Image (tube, helix red, strand yellow):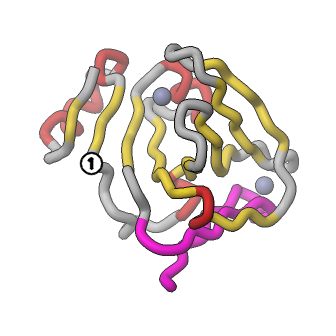
Amino acid sequence: MHTRTAACSCGQLRAICSGTAGRISICHCLACQRRTGAPFGAQSRFQREQVQIEGRSTTYTRQSDSGNNTRFHFCPECGSTVYWEPGGYPGFIYVALGMFADPNYPAPAHSVYETRRHPWTMHIADCPMEHMD
Ligand SMILES: [Zn+2]
Ligand SMILES: [Zn+2]
């Protein structure tokens, strides 16, 4: 089966993902901005059994607006967040899209929290995907 490997900056923490990615999205919320240091986060959702984790991670649990706890796993050496477990969607894992370091990775189909979007990222609004507040 086709696999893609997401890896942190130093490479010790990896998420090996089998098969087709599920929902691929970008999120403009302020929590994603703080987590990534970027104006928006990008992620790919997989079923838990599609993802094999290798390496050590430290976790940070954050309560989302919806009241669910999301558990982020980041590399204790380099600090990159590689994947997270969404409390609201048990059985799923989100993998940070940039960790695949693959410019040919499939494009996101959903753009979430656009009310928090930096105006200069306006061209994203023209992309053919679902746009949500
Ligand atoms: Zn690392
Ligand atoms: Zn977000």
Specify whether residue 11 is painted magenta. Answer: yes
Task: Check disc 1 and report its element: helix, strand or loop.
Answer: loop
Q: Measured from the top left, where is residue 102 in percent x and y?
A: 46, 67
Between 81 and 84, which is closer to the camera in this rendering? 84
- Range of the magenta residues? 1-20
Q: Quick check: 107 left or right of 89?
A: left
* Residue 19 forms part of the magenta stretch: yes
The residue that appears at 64% across and 18% down in the rendered structure is 63
Q: Residue at x 79, y 49 (%)?
A: 75
Q: Residue at x 47, y 38 (%)?
A: 41
Q: Amino acid at mark 1?
A: Ala
Residue at (57% x, 19% y) in the render = 64
Quadrant of the rendered structure where residue 132 is?
top left
Residue at which label 1 appears = 109
Q: Could you say which is closer to the camera, residue 115 or residue 21?
A: 21
Q: Tell which quarter ligand 1 is in.
A: bottom right
Question: Left or right: where does residue 87 sit relative to residue 45?
Answer: right
